[in-house]
Image (cartoon, coloured by chain):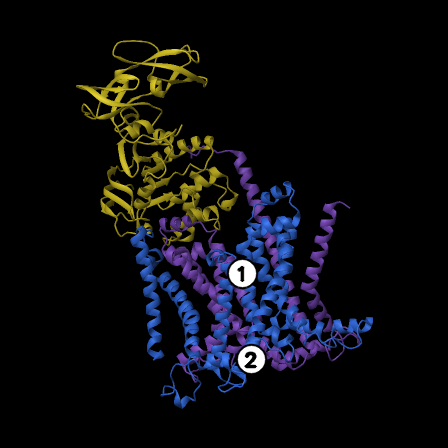
Amino acid sequence: MSRFLLPLIPVAVALIFWGMAAAERRAVGNVAHLGFFRRNGAALSVYLLGAVGLWILLLIVLPQLYMVEFSFRPRLPPSEMGGPKDAYTLANYSYLIFGRPGDPEGYNKLHLGIFLRTIVASIFVTMLNFAICYPIAFFMAKVAKGGQMRLMVLALIVPFWVNEILRAFAFRILFSSSGVFNTLLLASGLVDAPVDFLRSDIALYAGLSYAYLLLMIFPLYNAIEAMDSNQIEAARDLGAPWWHIHLFVVMPYAKPGIAAGCTMVFMLTAGALAAPQVLGGPSSLWFTQVVYNWFYQAFNWNLGAAYAFALLIACIIFVMVVLRLFKVSLGEIAR
Amino acid sequence: MTSKGIFRFFIGFYLLLFFGYLFGPLLIMGATAFNNSSYPQLWPWEGGTLDWFVKLANDQAMLRGIGNSLLVGLGVICLAVPIGLAGAIVMTQIYWRARGLYYLVVVSPLLTPGVIIGISTVLFWRQLLGADHPLYSGYFMTILGQATFISAYCMLIFLSRLQRFDRAQEEAALDLGASNLQFFWQVLLPFLRPAVFSAAVLAFLSSFENYNTTTFTILARTTLTTELAGRVRQGSNPSLSALALLIITITLIGAILYEIYKRREDRREKDRAAVAAAAEAEGEPAIIAA
Amino acid sequence: MSADVELDHVTIAFGNFIAVNDASLKINNGEFFSFLGPSGCGKTTILRTVSGFLEPTKGAVRIGGRDMSGIGPNKRPTALIFQNLALFPLMTVAENIAYGLRVRGMGRTERRRKAEHLLNMIALSDQGGKMVAELSGGQKQRVAIARALAVEPQVLLLDEPLSALDLKLRQHMRNELRAIQQRVGITFIYITHDQGEALTMSDRIAVMNEGVIQQVGDAKSIYDRPATSFVASFVGENNSLIGKVVQVDGAYAQIKTQMGNVTGRNLQDIRIGESAVAFIRPEKLTQHAAANQNRLQTTVKSIAFEGNLSHVYLVGPGHRHLTMTVGRETPLPEAGADIGLHAAIDDTLILPMGKLASGETGQ
């Protein structure tokens, strides 16, 4: 079935865009004057359409759609594929919620717990990230001068070209039982036995916050930078205390930037794999690790796909709800 | 101390803390590369050594990983830079009604967790090609998977450069008789050259350090990151620190070179403006006589 | 080489908005022709249609008798000088000038020779190696002209090329442009909203408003015999008095206005009962009574002294504002004085009611 549907999707997408173009032409007239091909010439048109078409269809849309479709099918040995058992089913998703049929608990306590923890911890990390980055972004946007500014940008970027794994590894050196912190604590006599930072997830949260700092700072910086400094001056002239200025003048203005930064950090934190694998405690898993295990330990790709899709949907829903709550539209953050 | 002085003190203190957080872990990790102890640690210091670098240089699996990473990185440049460029140009031409949807679609890979991009790429292409197809390989899958979102980075770089492109230049070139292709090669691409360069560097570095997507798409092979991940999970040893130190050093040198280049560019621009100002002051000669 | 340009019932629409409505005219070979009008009047649209960036919705553009439909801008015998010049910032001055030759496949040495010749012409002979960013505004202007002339177009199109320059340079460049046009002898089509530019440089001018060509003629006829109330109010200063036609007498018509009855020449065959506007140039108003004159009772509001001449601002019944311009030798009235103004009926023009140019335009 899917083999027949698949080739139809590019046609459908092309039709949608063609329809939108036609609708626009009807509403506001032929604004482009020269059509796409006439404007770019044949060779360039083929390159542009080919590259973008390849990207959108073969790399972005179809793989995602296929993953969704895949997650609704049972795992079968190759001989039974396409057979009577190869029918759409919700079994993979119901496994995430209810666990194995006949489970005494009635629901999948382990995986749901990990799922919830991943979301809640990601929220926590996002908020921590915002708290850390806001002063820096404000400083860069409104206080720092040209040369100082460029140096800061450079200093911000350089650590992020270091491998994700190695960055996590650096935190492991700091936090492991014979790591720097424990050596210091033991030597100073503050503790008698090494503190298990890994098991208590402190190392994980520190590493996760570190991992996406850059993605928080730059949207914040862009938003605050665009703000007229006179607004801050005016508020200061009116005698507003500094915290009031930030809370009621700068932050409302920078809302789209805050939303963009938080969205990105949240999505990427929830989807992180490197830091949890390196820094996570042995008993507590990140949800992506569960997905990984379905793929590479249980080799149940269908179930893994369902889990991955569930995570994606949950993240998107959560982001949408928060954006709605803060009255920021998706278009605003996409600037 | 005045209130401004206190404010400054706090800002300075905070900046110090922040950059301490940013660089501290990396510096400590770098230092452990020189400690002659089998576990990466700063304390106790068991004597300085360069053994870990030697060990790293002889680590075949690691070297193979680096080789694969380079290969994949080059592949990603070849795919993501042209795609990003096309994506950005199409963005500037697309009907405005479709623009929002288009933007959302092409930027979505940046928000999608890398794990999911990796999984969906492997699933889709395995279905499309069949598991025995020669193209269904770790290299090809990783290049495709990474290009999915790295193209979006490249597109954003090109878009910001294109925003400063004067559309009249396109019309001027055509008006002077250039074909679309001549305009593209002789006017647009030279203008975009810095962006092409940035996009290529960014694409390579993003590819080189990527883990989440790669770990799913690399299949039977390894890249540097997946190799590293395996090592780190098994237990650490200071040759990893040595590797990290090398990477940091290389990027720092790159960053410094880039900064020098940037300053030189700025100076050149300033010089040109000065020449123009001088010409402005000179006034206009009559050209009728010539 | 040169060619005439013909617009044959050209209509250009953007959706429901009609930018140019049924424009027909013929620009002669070797002529300096200007399109003059306020911004948004459709003049730039016409220029872009001639150069090939737009296709007419209806009608045809012909250059040298050849229909241009379906021929792209890179295939037309025209060259355009852009409002912002659109020089290529990454090429040197000489490379800019030779670009059109390069895309035509001309050899490097010949290209250089030709570029040097043009650099000579624009008095930048030793500056071919400079970057565009190193030039002054006027130099950039000249490079843009040389770049367009390098391809030896039959028609040169200029889209308000002087608007970015300061006043003094603008006046200098007017003379230069006119001189260049006479030297190369090709057709120039010049777009401007500055009537000073249009009047001083052009052989003929088309005045446009809201997509419609109002009048085509040389500077003198446009100034002296405007065909529509828009042209009368847009080109030069003019006093306008709105009223209804009460009498038509051969070549003259009389209208009833708030300031009394006014008689003037009737060039447009206006009929009794129609709405009409009487136009009197400020320099045609005097305080001296004579035969065959209109008389207007006014109060002096203020006086602006400008050296060789003075503007007297007046107000009449119904709060009609008038301006009188007088020379040095004429004694000026006192502010606040009630004075009678006179204008010969031959200096008064009666035109059918139509759109008036709003506000002050040009110098």
User: In the displayed structure, does residue C193 sit left or right of residue C345?
Assistant: right
Tell me the quarter of the image containing the C terminus of chain C. top left
Could you tell me residue A326's position as x and y percent? 52, 57
Q: Looking at the image, which residue is at 64% across and 76% down?
A: A280
What kind of residue is marked 2? Lys
Res A60 seen here: yes
Which residue lies at the image location 37% right of the left edge and 11% below the top edge? C339
Q: Work out whether disc 1 and disc 2 sit on a shared chain.
A: no
Chain represented in yellow: C
Q: Residue B188, located in which quarter of the rendered image? A: bottom left
Q: Which residue is mark 1?
A: B198
B218 shown above or below C225: below
Query: Where is residue A324 drawn, in percent x and y?
Result: 49, 59
Find the residue positioned furthest to the left. C250
The disc at residue A109 is 2
Element carrying mark 1: helix
- For label 2, count other residues whose C-alpha is less than 10 Å away and answer few (under 14), some (14-19) or many (20+): some
Judge by depth and name the residue closer to the eye, B73 or A300.
A300
- Callout in the foreground (1, 2): 2
Residue at mark 2: chain = A
Q: Nearer the viewer, residue C339 or A158?
A: C339
**Residue at the (72%, 46%) spot, across then down:** B4
Q: Residue at x 32, y 43 (%)?
A: C45
